[in-house]
Amino acid sequence: MPSRDDDTGGTPGGPPDRAAADRELLARVRAAPVLAGPLPRFDPDTAPDTPGPLFAGWLDRALTDGVREPQIMTLSTAGEDGTPSARVLILRGVDSADCAFVFAGDRGSGKGRDLAARPVAALTWYWPAQGRQIRMAGPVDVLGEDATRQDFLGRSARSRAAAFTGRVSTPLGGAEEYERENRAAEALVAAEPDRVPAGHTVYRLRAGAAEFFQADPARHHLRLRYTREGDRWTRTLLWP
Ligand SMILES: Cc1cc2nc3c(=O)[nH]c(=O)nc-3n(C[C@H](O)[C@H](O)[C@H](O)COP(=O)(O)O)c2cc1C
């Protein structure tokens, strides 16, 4: 396969044979190593009684081991009609005592509209270098103005300008329009450093179910589920 320095899927020098290209791609995917290890061990018998501290422990280990961007997670929501939607976000806060997770986004975005219609969601992390997957699911609340301001104003000027640029999840005309809007947003942030976008929203997912998956190179994977019942958690091993 010739090397390409772009990833647009174009075929240099001739009409594309998509089926052949797909077969070649699949062959390379199948040859790519998966769960090659070495992977950390996980003993469910010594796992904490509640999932929050286990999450914190795994995140701590991911950071210590140099896992890239362990704070990136997939948020899955469903629209009013049940249509699922998922995207990656940054983890903005953890309350390990209550097994709750904070993230932020715009109220008018797809996720914002989904959560307004159905305030329930799932979060998923996957750290390939460790073969670890974590899943959390539960109801989502909107945090108040103080948390919103604190979240937004704690960001870099560049990140705040990006949030003021255009309108997330609506059509964009092109690079020029982006640059124009971004310059205006940078000027706004410089002139009003304490301003928070009207749509900026901080959400808190309180897990009702939590799952920890530790993959094993020999495929003896471990899967531990926690389920919240009132103020207690029960633990169950699941077939992986
Ligand atoms: C690494 C990474 C981190 C992101 N973090 C956030 C975030 O914290 N909040 C956010 O609203 N969008 C974030 N995004 C953008 C979202 O993935 C998504 O494009 C955007 O929120 C609009 O999605 P929606 O229309 O489904 O709401 C991030 C994207 C990437 C690639």
Image (cartoon, rainbow, N blue to C red):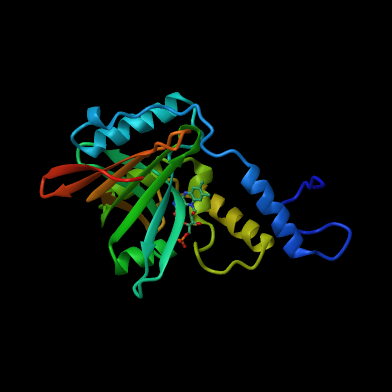
Residue that appears at 46% across and 51% down: 88
Looking at this rendering, what residue extends furthest in the top direction? 64
In the rendered view, does 165 fall on the left or right side of 239?
A: right
Q: Nearer the viewer, residue 51 or 172?
A: 51
The image shows residue 135 at horizontal and vertical percentages of 34, 47
Residue that appears at 20% across and 48% down: 227
Above or below, 223 relative to 43: below
The image shows residue 51 at horizontal and vertical percentages of 24, 38
The image shows residue 68 at horizontal and vertical percentages of 51, 34
Residue that appears at 55% across and 39% down: 34
In the rendered view, does 205 fall on the left or right side of 126?
A: left
Residue that appears at 35% across and 71% down: 82
The image shows residue 42 at horizontal and vertical percentages of 34, 29
In the rendered view, does 137 fall on the left or right side of 177?
A: left
Res. 8 visible in picture: no
Q: Nearer the viewer, residue 26 or 130?
A: 26
Numbered disc total: 0
Looking at this rendering, what residue extends furthest in the right direction? 13
Q: Nearer the viewer, residue 76 or 140?
A: 76
Res. 112 visible in picture: yes
Looking at this rendering, what residue extends furthest in the bottom direction? 81
Above or below, 117 relative to 144: below
Quadrant of the image containing the C terminus = top left
In the rendered view, does 10 fall on the left or right side of 72?
A: right
Where residue 184 sits, quadrant-wise, is bottom right
Q: Nearer the viewer, residue 107 or 192?
A: 107
